[in-house]
Image (spheres, helix red, strand yellow):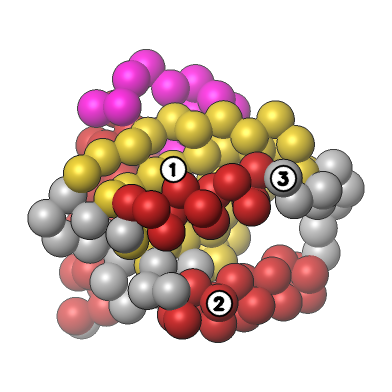
Amino acid sequence: MYQLAYISKANNEFTLDELTDLSIDAGMRNRQIDVTGMLVYHQGVFLQFLEGNEHTIGELYERIANDPRHSDCQVIYTNEATTRLFSNWFTHYLSFEYIKEITGEELAGDIAELLAGEVEDEDHVERVLNKFTSIVSSRQSD
């Protein structure tokens, strides 16, 4: 299982309807190629986490990086993993406000740092992702 996270800058502001449509379209495509992950958009910046077959993720990222809706794509994390973090999410969109609501200020602050490109190293990104998925998993089992 290959994991990749990137940040990028939107070339235009996105409305909630546009983000929802983007998430639905990407989710349908990603389901067909067995790619899971999440998409966050906040103040003109995207943070996306993808996981699946390494070759498939590489091709998908190449297509994403060339999408004219955003620029300055920067990979902030790659990893070989044995399990998926987002096993049931085929590119699920989350607003930053919702993330703050379910995770609290500290973890939302960590995610805001990632969105701002303030990445210490890949271990930092992995810690944030693991904390996030742990919180989301516990909320889904409630």
Camera-side residue: 94 or 71?
A: 71
Q: Which residue is mark 1?
A: 5
Q: Amino acid at mark 3?
A: Asn
**Residue at point 69%, 70% (across, down):** 22
The quarter of the picture where residue 105 lies is: top left
Q: Which residue is mark 3?
A: 66
Give the residue furthest to the right. Answer: 12
Q: Where is 81 relative to 30, above or below?
A: above
* Residue 7 left/right relative to 121: right
Mark 3 or mark 2: which comes first in sequence? 2
| Picture coordinates of residue 73, whole percent (x, y) | 63, 34
Q: Which residue is mark 2?
A: 29
Local secondary structure at mark 2 = helix
Local secondary structure at mark 1 = strand
Start-end of magenta stretch? 110-123
Q: Where is 20 relative to 56, above or below?
A: below
**Residue at point 49%, 68% (across, down):** 91
Q: Amino acid at mark 2?
A: Arg
Mark 1 or mark 2: which comes first in sequence? 1
